Amino acid sequence: MADPLADEARRLRIVERLSRHDIQRRLGVGKDRLSALLRDVPPPDWTKRPNAKDDLRARAVELRGTGRSVTDIARAFRVAKSTAYQWVRHLPLDPDAEAEAGRRRAHSRRMTDARWAAHREARDNARAETVLAAANWVKSLRYRELILIGAAIYWCEGAKAKPWRPNDCRIKFVNSDPALIVLFLRFVEALGVQRSALRYRVAIHETADVPAATRWWADLVGVSVETFQRPSLKKHRPKTNRLNTSDGYRGCLNIEVPQSSRMYWKVEGIIRGMAGEDRDVGR
């Protein structure tokens, strides 16, 4: 038995060429009901909008046919490499063309290196001189400076109490920068806690050399490997394009100060004082 509502929906779509929104309003039905009524009705041509980049896609395919690489195509049309790859991935380069593209890239790198070698050397020398001069300017930190700086880096990088955990006031610091780790340890020692009393844990990807990383961090902080807690391993995801896979990758070091509520309160007060908020917050 024919459905009069379905017949009317089809007529409005095909004959009167109304949009789905207009048909919904005309018939007083919802989206799901209208979809059921128009299940076998193909969308009219006027609803198919042309892709703004169809012409670029066609030209990209032509360039690919001449042996151009994805990088060359992306640069030619000022699009992302991923976009260029989607356009031409069905047209892999033949071995000879791919080898030629590789030679062109290698030649381009050599030319770029030759052109900018002097500039890079001058830049690297200027950086080294500036870093050394700044380090010599610091010389040594006074107690007050060390406390202020240590509190600041902790408030930036350390764990803080949350509105939903207002009493979770523990000093926990995590970082991958050896310089910040050493500076934080000096700060903690200045407040009267020896680094041998701290808790250490390495956080690192499971594919890394975990024992070697643990030994490296133990040497840096000056404690034995046996004092470290079980490492926190991050599961490896093959699809993730990680850059921290070299031999120098050592993960992060977690440092926790036991029974550190009062130290946390002190850090909180120091930050408030440095920000000019030393008055009572409740006022």
Image: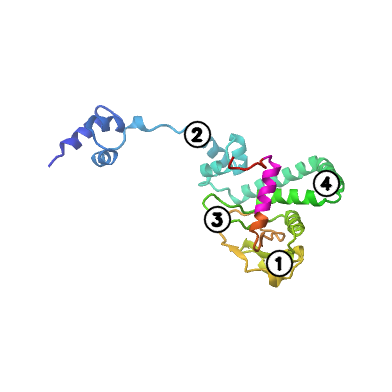
What's under tag 3, amino acid-wise?
Lys
Residue 172 visible in the shown view: no
| Front: mark 4 or 3 | 4
Kindly indicate the quadrant of the structure image that contains residue 22.
top left
Query: Residue 239, which numbered label?
Result: 3
Tell which residue pokes out farthest to the bottom in this image.
Answer: 226
Residue at image position (24%, 36%) is 29
| Front: mark 3 or 1 | 1
Residue occupied by mark 2: 53
Marks 4 and 2, Cα distance to the nearest angstrom?
A: 48 Å
Magenta segment boundaries in residue numbering: 265-276
Question: Magenta part mainly helix, strand or loop?
Answer: helix
Looking at the rendering, in which quadrant would you find the N terminus?
top left
What's under tag 1, amino acid-wise?
Ala
Query: Residue 131, which numbered label?
Result: 4
Residue occupied by mark 1: 197
How busy is the neighbourhood of tag 2: few (under 14 within 10 Å), some, or many (20 plus)? few
How busy is the neighbourhood of tag 3: few (under 14 within 10 Å), some, or many (20 plus)? few
Image location of residue 32, percent across then percent down? 28, 41
Residue at image position (79%, 40%) is 116
Q: Earlier in the sequence, mark 4 or mark 2?
A: 2
Q: Earlier in the sequence, mark 4 or mark 3?
A: 4
Helix, strand or loop at mark 2: loop
| Front: mark 4 or 2 | 4
In the rendered image, residue 274 lying in the magenta stretch gets the answer yes
Q: Earlier in the sequence, mark 3 or mark 1?
A: 1
Q: Earlier in the sequence, mark 2 or mark 1?
A: 2
